[in-house]
Image: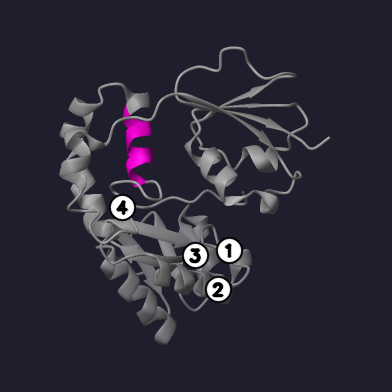
Amino acid sequence: MQSLPVFLVLAGRPVILTGQGDATEAKRRLLERAGALIVGEEDQAAIAIVADGDEATVARLRARGVLVNATDRPDLCDFTLPAIVDRAPVLIAIGTGGASAGLAKALRQRIEAMLPQKLGALATALHDARAAIRARWPDAGARRRAIDAGLSQGGIIDLFTDNAVDAVPDWLSGQGDVAPSRFVPVRLLSGDPDDLSLRVARLLGEADRVYHMPNVPPAILDRARADAVRISAAVPPADPGDGLSLWLEMPR
């Protein structure tokens, strides 16, 4: 990754905004949506948006240790602003590292069309049920697998169904039992992540641990769940452990 995606909590915090015109007003609206206190160049703040991309302004702010976004000047940016899909409290940020705002916009439009408007309500329902979820599945691994199963395609709280929010109580009451432990061998088609089938991509996103031959490339392993344990081995494990374990091998 060329940069680390983060979500900044700006409510009540100062953010410097400089420039004039439509681009500045667009950034102002974005910052106001995030609850930021918009201040000028001479004020104290940790981050700044230079909406006119002025190089001298960027230099002055950077000299003060301020992190700067310069509109349409990716070479001057300490951070970039993504295209945003807003299903509050769910936010999806799409960035291209400043390579193409048009591409980010096109991706946002595609994703906007896919995601249901009730996605935010489902997130809120799951947040409100956190205590009940912990009580139902005290073990962290079992809890994660139950959530994965419920939210999976065809699951009782599948986010693409109309009644996902209303189904949360049924899921908690007993229809969200954790799937039994599984060990799934996977013969990869190639070392190119684009060749992963939807099934294999989903398994990688859900796996507790990923056993793999040493020649499986990092680009494939990077598609696994961030918290999944990666274990390089010459042969499949005799005892893969609880939850979902995968064995990845390259084509012969």
| Labels 2 & 3 near each other (Cβ < 8 A) | no
Contact, mark 1 vs mark 2 (Cβ under 8 Å): yes
Q: Nearer the viewer, mark 4 or mark 1?
A: 1
Q: Secondary structure at mark 1?
A: loop
Q: What span is in magenta?
A: 143-151
The three-letter code of the residue at mark 3 reads Asn
The majority secondary structure of the magenta stretch comes to helix
Query: Amino acid type of disc 2?
Result: Ala
Tag 1: amino acid: Thr
Query: Where is residue 197 drawn, in percent x and y?
Result: 62, 50
| Contact check, label 3 and label 4, Cβ < 8 Å | no
Instruction: Say which amino acid is labelled 4.
Output: Val
Residue 53 percent coordinates (x, y): 53, 75
Judged by depth in the image, the label closer to the viewer, 2 or 3, is 2
- Numbered label attached to residue 101: 2
Which disc number belongs to residue 69?
3
Q: N-terminal of the two: label 3 or label 1?
A: 3
Select label 3 or label 1 by which is in front.
1
Q: Is residue 186 magenta?
A: no
Q: Which residue in the protein does label 4 denote? A: 9
Q: Which of marks 4 and 3 precedes in the sequence?
A: 4
Which label number is shown at residue 96?
1
Q: Which mark is residue 121?
A: none
